[in-house]
Image (tube, rainbow, N blue to C red):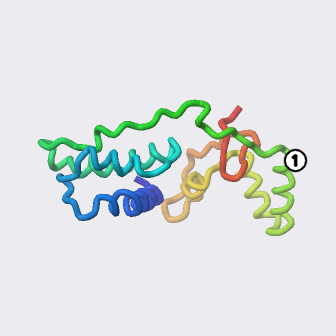
Amino acid sequence: MAFATLISYRKVLNSIWRPALGKQLFHQVRYSSLVKIADERAWSKKTYNNAISIVRCAFDFGYRDHSEHFNPARGLRSARLKKADRPRIDPFTMQDAETLIAAIHRDWGEAQGNYNEFRFFTGLRPSDERRKSGGERGIRTDFRPQVRSASYRFGKRSAPQ
C-alpha cells in the first residue's frame, strides 16, 4: 500500500469510524453499528463507497487472526455508481492549455515550462512523476509516456480519446 494511501485511510478511520465506535473491542463491533455509522452522514455515493471500503479493509486485516468469528464489515454493501452519478468531464480547451503553459514559461522559466508542458500533454500524474524521476531508487527504463489529449481541468482527467 502506498504511503499516501495509508495516510488517507488513517484520516478516514480517525475522523469517521474510531470516534463513533469509541472504546469498543474489535470483536464486539456489530454489523448494525457499522451500518448506523455509515448512514448517519450525508455522503455522495463515491465518498460512501470509499469509507466503506476502508473500514472493510481494516476489519478484513483484523479478522485474519480470528477467522472463526464473523467479520461484520463484510456485510456492508457499496452503493452502485451509475453514469449519471459521475461528474461531467470538463477538460481544458487547447487555448486554456496554451495559456497556462505560456504563464508557467513566463513565471518559472523555460525548463519548468517545458517540464510542465510534457506532464500536461502526456497525462503524467504526480504519482507517476515521482516513480519515474529515479532518485535513490534508480532510473526506470520502462517508462513510455502515452500521448493524451489536453484533458485536465482542476485535477479531473478524462480517458484518452
Viewer-side residue, 122 vs 20: 20
Q: At 56% across and 59% down in the image, what residue appears?
A: 134
Q: Would you say 43 lies left or right of 160 here? A: left
Residue at 22% x, 43% y is: 71
Task: Residue type at mark 1: give it.
Answer: Gln
The front one of 91 and 34 is 34
**Residue 158, picture quadrant:** top right
Spot occupied by residue 45 in the image (x, y as percentages of width and height):
50, 41
Answer yes or no: is residue 56 visible: no
Image coordinates of residue 138 in percent, x first then y, are 51, 59
Check disc 1 and report the residue beneath it: 95
Q: Please give the count of numbered marks on the rendered protein.
A: 1
Position of residue 155 relative to residue 11, above or below, is above
Give the secondary structure at mark 1. Answer: helix
Q: Is residue 34 visible?
A: yes
Residue 141, horizontal then vertical, whole percent: 57, 48
**Image point (63%, 42%), residue name:** 144
Q: Residue at x 73, y 42 (%)?
A: 90
Quadrant into which the C terminus falls: top right
